[in-house]
Amino acid sequence: MDRKDEILNQLKSIIDPDLNQDIVSLGFIKKLEINDEGSVAFDLELTTPACPVKEQFRADCEKVLLELPWVTRVTVALKSSRAKSALTNAGKGLADVRFIIGVASCKGGVGKSTTAVNLAFSLAEKGATVGIFDADVYGPSLPTLIDVEFNGLYQKNQLIIPVEYQGVKLMSFAYASANTGGGPAIMRGPMVTQVINQLLTGTDWGELDYLVIDMPPGTGDTQLTLSQLIPMTAAVIVTTPQQLSFVDVVKGIQMFDKLKVPTIAVIENMSYFICDECDKRHNVFGTGSMRKLVEQFGFSNAFSLPIDADISNISDAGIPYVIEKPDSPITKIYKDITDSVIREVSKIAYSEERQPEVSLASENRISYRAGDSEIAYIDSSTLRLACRCAGCINEMTGEQIVESAAIPDDIAAEQVTPMGNYAVSVSWSDGHSSIYPYDMLTELMSTV
Ligand code: ADP
């Protein structure tokens, strides 16, 4: 084995816990250089500079390579892959923005803006470049939440220069309307979306890893149109613990689902209260709704934040809570939320880059190829039997209604079309159509 292979072999023992694959197969090792004295240097190219385990990766690389007797020195440069901005066509201002995270809620006053701000500043604290766009034209709160000196907006090269606070770029309708004398916005739906879109794409965001969007509350037409206009990578939904809010969250998840924007975390804000006197946690509204959400949607990223006077006092003073109270247990929760967002977005970025190719093949089969692996085939009847549509699956029990005997002998897939970034749709010769998420196809392929 030559030295390069020896190095790669050792590095293969390091597994990315989120992508469940080794860092060599994931293509993270770039520009590997080995000199005659046994000095090894390479770039470790991660999907985000805010990767929560980047230092652990670096330490693991050094450890496993120094186990080789000839290696004298290891230099690992942490890089993040900037090669692809999914938003290159989304308008000049967004051309170098890598990921857009929409923070949404189904009602006003649940703490959506507070959460968006703390998420953004926690992302920045982890080394990412971040912006916040306040898309809530009816009640823009960014100027209240962040107390920054503001002397009016100006343009450069036809783009508006955003306001900045501690390295995070900020834009709000409130800044734009201050230029024209301020006052509340009296606008109807179509105008709202137009104004928001202009401000979003007309701002000079520059190179950003994450743009956090504080969405207007609700799941109506305005929100739907906006979500169609803004090329969101993922959504975070903020709610409160009452039973009634549960119904709203489901509506929110369904709205984003329709647009193929995955909801990556749900945050139950003002969920409990910790009493000063007894230091006990009081779940004023019970804990049932959150449990239901986790069970129904399989959310692994569900978080609860307490109701806490400091959150509102510090926010009202115009300072992000996570900056003012870096060591508090509540900041720890914001950090956990942030880590889960980073992880989920990385997974999305990775799967987009490596979407399998699925197409019709001869002999009534479908071909499937993931990354550099060999082409695999699945026959039409097996694929049809795996259909999870409402007509084929009992929604209550999750069990298959259609049995293999009920699938026509001559059933054939007639068309395979990608649907968004996560699934393919298959049209069948008997008029049926099915949707198969790539994850499910990958699993199915491993069993045939
Ligand atoms: P939204 O964006 O959903 O309208 P905001 O983020 O503006 O809500 O929050 C509404 C009010 O609630 C603000 O005064 C804010 O300081 C306060 N608030 C938000 N989260 C909490 C919390 N966990 N504990 C106490 N007050 C909170």
Image: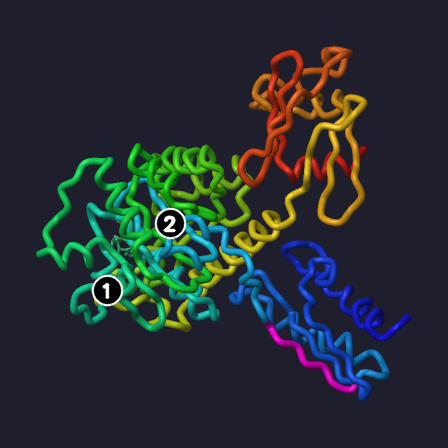
Mark 1 / mark 2, whichever is N-terminal: 2
Which is in the foreground here, disc 1 or disc 2?
Answer: 2
What quarter of the picture does the N terminus occupy? bottom right
Ligand 1 is within 8 Å of the C-beta of the residue at disc 2: no
> Label 2 is placed on what type of residue?
Val
Q: Position of residue 223 (x, y in %)?
A: 32, 38
| Position in image of residue 302 (x %, y %) | 48, 48
Q: Is residue 369 above or below residue 130?
A: above
Query: Horizontal and vertical percent for residue 298?
Result: 55, 40
Q: Is mark 1 within 8 Å of ligand 1?
A: yes
- Looking at the rendering, the stretch of residues picked out in magenta corresponds to 72-78
Q: Quadrant of ligand 1?
A: bottom left
Quadrant of the image containing the C terminus: top right
Query: Which residue does the numbered mark 2 point to in the structure image?
Result: 103
Label 2 Cα crowd, 10 Å radius (few <14 / some 14-19 / many 20+): many
Q: Residue at x 84, y 69 (%)?
A: 5
* Helix, strand or loop status at disc 2: strand
* Identity of the residue drawn at 68% across and 39% down: 357
Q: Nearer the viewer, residue 390 or 110?
A: 390
Name the kind of residue labelled 1 in the image. Asn
Residue at (63, 19) in percent of width and height: 392
Residue 20 placement: quadrant: bottom right
Residue 74 painted magenta: yes
Q: In the rendering, at what x and y percent does residue 156 appear?
A: 27, 65
Q: Secondary structure at mark 1?
A: helix
Q: Which residue is mark 1?
A: 313
Mark pair 1, 2: CA separation: 22 Å
